[in-house]
Image (cartoon, rainbow, N blue to C red):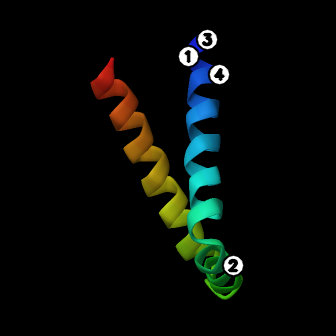
């Protein structure tokens, strides 16, 4: 359970850094995401999920 909280905390740190350092870029990306087809977003999400699982698996 402790690892889960550490992981959530790291996600929040990275997301917070993006908003703090590049607020205009984040806003533009959000607008662009609305124009990307669902299947493309879904594919990107699955790839990110797989990479995340691979990183966690290799680090353990």
The reply to whether dot 3 and dot 2 touch (C-beta < 8 Å) is: no
Q: Tell me which numbered mark, 4 or 2, is placed earlier along the sequence.
A: 4
Looking at the rendered image, the quarter that the C terminus falls into is: top left
Q: Quadrant of the N terminus?
A: top right
Identify the element where label 2 is drawn: helix
Q: Of label 3 and label 2, which has the lower sequence position?
A: 3
Helix, strand or loop for disc 3 = helix
Residue 40 lies left or right of residue 38; in this view the side is left
Sequence-wise, which precedes: disc 1 or disc 2?
A: 1
Give the residue number, with chain letter if any, for mark 1. 3
Label 3, on which residue? 2
Relative to residue 60, is residue 24 depicted above or below?
below
Q: Residues within 10 Å of mark 3 (few under 14, many from 20)?
A: few
Q: Are marks 1 and 3 in contact (CB under 8 Å)?
A: yes
Q: Residue furthest front?
A: 21
| Residue appearing at x 43%, y 56% in the figure | 47
Question: Disc 1 to disc 4, how far (Cα)?
Answer: 5 Å
32 over 51 or under it: above or below: below
Residue at (64%, 32%) from the top-left corner? Answer: 8
Image quadrant where residue 30 sits:
bottom right
Q: CA distance from mark 4 to mark 2?
A: 27 Å
Q: Which residue is mark 4?
A: 5
Q: Is the residue under label 3 in contact with that under label 4 (CB below 8 Å)?
A: yes
Depth order, front residue of 21/38: 21
């Amino acid at each position: 359970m402790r690892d889960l909280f550490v992981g959530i905390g790291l996600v929040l740190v990275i997301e917070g850094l993006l908003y703090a350092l590049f607020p205009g870029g984040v806003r533009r990306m959000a607008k662009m995401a609305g124009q990307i087809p669902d299947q493309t977003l879904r594919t990107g999400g699955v790839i990110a999920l797989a990479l995340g699982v691979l990183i966690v698996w290799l680090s353990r």
